[in-house]
Amino acid sequence: MPQSTTIRTGRFAPTPSGPLHFGSLVAAVASYCHSKSTDGQWLVRIEDLDTPRVIKGSADNILQTLETFGFEWDREVLYQSQRFEIYEEYLQQLISTGLVYACNCSRKSLLKSPQSSGPLGKIYPGICRSKHLNLNSLKLRLNQEAAGLIEFNDNHFGLFKLDLTKEAGDIILKRQDGIYAYHLAVIIDDAFQQVTDIVRGADLLASTTIHLHLNKLLGFSSAEYLHIPLINNEAGVKLSKQTGAKGLSVEIASKQLLDALSFLGQKTTAELYHCKPVDILKYATDHWDRAKIPHPI
């Protein structure tokens, strides 16, 4: 793992399961401006970890779209699908702590058992903790029985707390089909890329507590976090590929950039509507003020 650095580093990490949409653009703009406003670096990571969800050609389309919208990244693009051996290495490190166990509970069986829900969904109650099942052929979970309360100060939402034991349960680190969990991969990649500032949607606030816990278990330094408000569709549901969000239109890139900045509460001018995307991003970076990001009502 590389040594720590004083260079502020942010990242944008889309999943190539379809084109970028307006919600993606808002996250990209926020992370880009937040990093570049401090003369920091901005990286792009393609999170193609869940290979069954990947749509062929989406990664290239995403990168081309970012270029059209004026974004420039400072290092080579990282692809999670090329890093499975690295994830396995750190998974084995966690296994050596005795905190990882195999689980043979099916979704069907869990639906029949009483499970309460938390911010991250259904809470797995540790049914397989003491079964000592074979680690090589089943899904693997992290025993969070002793994890307890995790808290952090978000740079937008302030203090956030979650009791991982009571409100999250034992999370999956590796699926039965061999796919590594997002929670594991993301903290390994952030540490490898020396990311110091993570800007992303507020739907990942609760997940951050898991990431902080995993960082501690693996001896990684933790970044600073800035979670931004979510964009909802007309039905009040988060705008995403799963909810039918439309892809960005490169023909009106400048307008969509300005719309993203307006959503983030940032300063714009009428003259910017006649500027190229790269010039709009330069202006936005020079005038970035995270304090102006609106808070949900």
Image: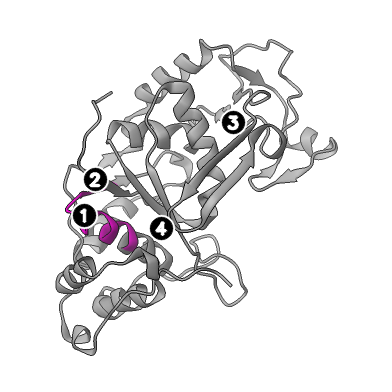
In the drawing, does residue 220 fall left or right of residue 238? Answer: left
Whether tag 1 and tag 3 are in contact, CB under 8 A, the answer is: no
**Which amino acid does the dot numbered 2 rest on?**
Arg
Note whether 17 is above or below 295 in the view shown. above
Q: Position of residue 113 (x, y in %)?
A: 84, 35
> Which residues, given as a range, are shown in magenta?
30-44
In terms of depth relative to the viewer, which is nearer, 105 or 170? 170
Instruction: Look at mark 3 in the image and give the residue it sits on.
Output: 172
In the drawing, does residue 297 fall left or right of residue 261? Answer: right
Which one is earlier in the sequence, the residue at label 4 or at label 3? Answer: 4
Which one is earlier in the sequence, the residue at label 3 or at label 2? Answer: 2
Q: In which quarter of the image is residue 118?
A: top right
Q: Is residue 181 visible?
A: no
Instruction: Look at mark 4 in the image and give the residue it sits on.
Output: 18
Q: Distance between the residues labelled 4 and 2?
A: 30 Å
Note whether 150 is above or below 130 in the view shown. below
**Which amino acid does the dot numbered 3 rest on?**
Ile
Determine whether the residue tagged by mark 4 lies in a helix, strand or loop.
loop
Is residue 76 covered in magenta?
no
Q: Quadrant of residue 134?
A: top right
Q: Position of residue 165 (x, y in %)?
A: 68, 31
Q: Residues within 10 Å of mark 4 (few under 14, many from 20)?
A: many
In the drawing, does residue 21 fall left or right of residue 167? Answer: left
Whether tag 2 and tag 1 are in contact, CB under 8 A, the answer is: yes
Q: How far apart are marks 3 and 2 (CA)?
A: 31 Å
Which numbered dot is residue 38? 1
Front: mark 1 or 3: 1
In terms of depth relative to the viewer, which is nearer, 82 or 191? 191
